[in-house]
Amino acid sequence: MILVKVHGSDHVETHKVEVFPCVIGRSMHCGIRVDDPSVSARHAEVHQTSDGYILKDLFSTNGIWQAGGKVKEVKIGARESIVFGDVQIEFITADILERTHDSKLLPHEHSEPAHWLALKIAASLLIALLVGVFVPTMEQYLWYWPPEKLSELAGRAILLWLQISAVALVISVFCKVNVKRFNFHKVLLLISLSLVAERLVSHFMPSVVYNLHNLAGAKFLKHLGYGAIIYILLLRLQRYAFPKWQLRYRRWVAIGVSLISITIIELVIERQLGERSRMADLGMPSSALAPAQSSDDLMFAIGLTIAATDQERIRQLERLESGDD
Amino acid sequence: MRALINDYLRSPRSLALACFFVIAMDAAHAFASESMPTNTKSVAGVLADVFQIKIATDANSPKAAYGSCFVVDAAGILATNFHVVAYALHDPKKYHLYLIDGDRSIPAEVVAIDAVNDLALVQVDRTFNRAVKFAHGLPESGDKIYSIGWPEDLNKAVSEGNFNGLMQAGPYRKIQMSIPLNPGMSGGPTINDAGEVIGVNVSLRADSQSLAFAIPYESLRTLMREKKASLSRPEDHDDFDETMRAQLERVQEEIATNVLRESDATLKIGSWNIFKPTKIVKCWHSQESGPRDQTQVITEQCYLSGSMPIKRDLDAGTFRLRYQAIENRNLNAWQFLHQLNDELEDQPFAIADKVERFTTSLRCRQLDLVNPKNVGLRVHYCVNGFVPYAEAYNLEFELVASSAQRTALLVSGSFLGFSAHNALAILRTIINSIAWDHK
């Protein structure tokens, strides 16, 4: 086991590394994440060998530096101070820990204060909400896609980006969270792709444009895109909520939740809820839920509506009679 | 495009003449004496048979509605319009009828109605010296005729004009005439040169230059014969409801039979084919293109020019249809459909929601379907029913059929006071007839 102390600009983060090899870098997939622009996505890697630990440069842009000189590989001694780009990182092996029992060197249970966690979760939820607000806005834009002129398309794209950047900025200012962590580009791309897919599927279906089935298929594609967005956001949220979970588990949970969400959107919200509430207004049995296919079905539906009207008529008549008495 | 489409149903409609809540009388206006027609003798003879009728909560109430009526039987029977007495019929506990005889208000009672022809007979407890004479035929077109009544609760007035022939729309028959009628003259007689009654003043087309209508005298004579044949006791409130129901049922049945008889009549509008009844409706055709987005709209509006009045602002026994072929090759398919969808959602329904004591609340729904000619349709419809008349409903629908070629057909229509069976039969005929004509 080794301890890794990352000296950031405002605070020091301490990580305990027990699983090897461990990658250090800016990417969220790294064992130790160093959020600094001078650090490459996958910067370096710590290996455990029979005679101690070795730090290897993974062809990073800015390299690793020891005692003022750029190195490819370092054997980690008892206590080593290495510079990654602009960040200083200290490596402390178990030997020295056992000898000194220096409690100050050991990592805290949470490397960040508790209220930070809450803030970040709130930020994630806020983003999810704002994306929800954006989706309809973007749909509105995309209805007129492709626009008559290319300049219009460019203008709309810029406007869209500005909006998203503004939200990202607000979040980063209030929550001190690096906006890059929220993968806005992926979210935007997915929303756009899913909406475009919906349009394309509907477009290339045969002449019956208002046919329910085509639209349902197209909508499913869109919902798949929404599922992916939920997946990304959940993964991000879990990183703060459950930092100790392994990435593998987080992924499964996120996949599960997004699949359930799609199912809910598809079956409950889109198909049933809207229709059912309308039917309930009409006092219809839910067995009349099947979508109309032919003019006979329409006549049947109108018949049901008329029957509901008759019930109201009788109620009104009774009320009138009792009122007259 | 929106501007073109939204002036939906601004079709000319007959305006009831009854003048409600009349303003304070203006004594300086005494214009009856200044314009007596040339044929003074015969017209003056009828003047004495015309009275004013008042609908109010009591005899002295200043808040009242007024109409005209005339003596058809010296034993105390007078004729007027149904829409004049409708308030007193529908709410007999609150509103009462009074015949104004000089300074006296004599209580009157409705004894027979023919709502289809907008006629009513009232009885008063007093005898008259004489009754009007009926003509033995309608005049020639262009002949001079006169309408007598009490305009705006002022003095009794005579209007002079010309007979312009008979108008027949399904079960509704009216005399068309060019006479300046005014509110309050409803229920007064229309007479020929010889002073014989040829009709009963009924309505005036709004925004027109003295284009007025009267009910032909035969309808009134029929009602009088029916009244004589039945028992002479005054019918009570429920009986009138039942009479109205029966009359509405008969009239909508006649209309539906007429419409469905020509069920294979089709209209080509744009690149669409659709059923269009021709015999009993009047249709207007117009073609416009929007200035901004070049949307081509071909519109065909049809309506039955006549209806059965139930009460003020509530008619039944009539229907109207509007077809619109919309085309815009400048938009792409999605822009076009998007616009179309907006259009459909914006369409206001013309049926009033709930009219207290008369209709139930409006129930609306939307459905998608494919008709036998393989055209995909989205249909919005709204239904409500008449409370006093069983089996009478208002059905209003709007549907859109669209092809991938950026042409669409918007159809809207309403059936007022129809039985479910008839309204559905006509709607089915319309929906099943829609076909897209591939060029």
Image: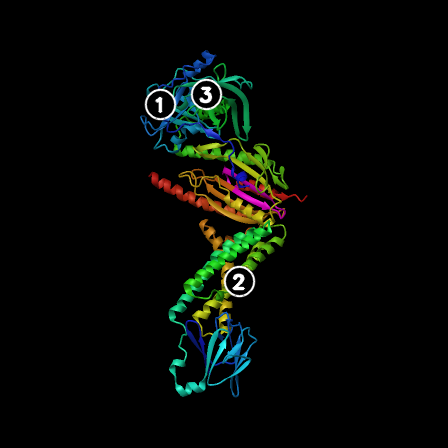
Q: Amino acid at mark 1?
A: Met
- Which residue is identified by label 3? B189
Q: Amino acid at mark 3?
A: Pro
Q: Amino acid at mark 2?
A: His
- Which residue is identified by label 2? A185
Decide: is B120 above or below A172.
Answer: above
Would you call the spot at circle 3 few (<14 residues within 10 Å), some (14-19), or many (20 or more)?
Answer: many
Decide: is B52 above or below A291.
Answer: above
Furthest toward the right, the residue is B439
Query: Mark 3 touching mark 1, by CB under 8 A?
Result: no
Q: Could you tell me residue B43's position as x and y percent?
A: 45, 14
- Which residue is identified by label 1? B25
Mark 2: secondary structure: helix
Pointer 3 chain: B
Pointer 2 chain: A
Give the total of numbered labels: 3
Q: Which residues are magenta?
A: B397-421
The Cα atoms of the two marked residues, 2 and 3, are separated by 81 Å
Depth order, front residue of B340/B52: B340
- Specify whether A319 is left or right of B168: left
- Specify whether A149 is left or right of B68: right
Query: Mark 1 touching mark 2, by CB under 8 A?
Result: no
The magenta stretch spans residue B310: no
The quadrant in which the C terminus of chain A is found is top left
Residue at image point 47% right, 67% down: A236
The Cα atoms of the two marked residues, 3 and 1, are separated by 23 Å
Residue at image point 56% right, 40% down: B426
Depth order, front residue of B98/A160: A160
Q: Could you tell me residue B290's position as x and y percent?
A: 57, 39
